Amino acid sequence: MSIVILPEARAYLRIIGTDLDPAITVAMAAAESEVAGFIGGDTPATRWPEPVPAPGDVKAAALMLVRLHFEESNAVQAELWRGIAQRLLVRYRTDSGLGGA
């Protein structure tokens, strides 16, 4: 199970139609990978198996990261979105991210 599904990502990005679905799908995969890397432990699919949805703050963070990976943005804007997403995810973090510390 993905944290975000394609119709949700399309709606969040305000995309009508399916022409950009391949690019959105790549952005979704990158966002999910970034979420998994940040929170550590089980993958999101294991942590929130179907039919259990990911919590709203996790979904919001993933959607922000989808936007970050999909749209062109400057480094300052990208780090702002990433920082907000990480603040939403920090309570789900299972490790320090410091290589076993």
Image: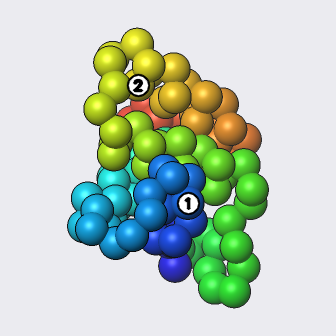
In front: 78, or 95? 78
Q: Name the residue under label 2.
A: 78
How far across and how far down the image is residue 7, in percent? 52, 71
The residue type indicated by label 2 comes to Ala
Q: How crowded is mark 2: few (under 14 residues within 10 Å), some or many (20 or more)?
A: some
Against 80, is 39 above or below? Answer: below
Residue at position x 46%, y 35% in the image? 97
Question: Label 1 vs label 2: CA separation?
Answer: 20 Å
Q: How crowded is mark 1: few (under 14 residues within 10 Å), some or many (20 or more)?
A: few
Residue at position x 34%, y 39% in the image? 71
Residue 96: name its quadrant: top right
In front: 56, or 23? 23
How far across and how far down the image is residue 56, in percent? 74, 56
Q: Name the residue under label 1.
A: 11
Residue 72's disc is none
Using the rendered image of the protein, determine whether residue 84 is visible from the camera's viewpoint.
yes
- Secondary structure beneath dot 2 equals helix
Q: Earlier in the sequence, mark 1 or mark 2?
A: 1
- Secondary structure beneath dot 1 equals helix
Residue at position x 44%, y 63% in the image? 16
Q: Is residue 79 left or right of residue 3?
A: left
The residue type indicated by label 1 comes to Ala
Residue 59: name its quadrant: bottom right
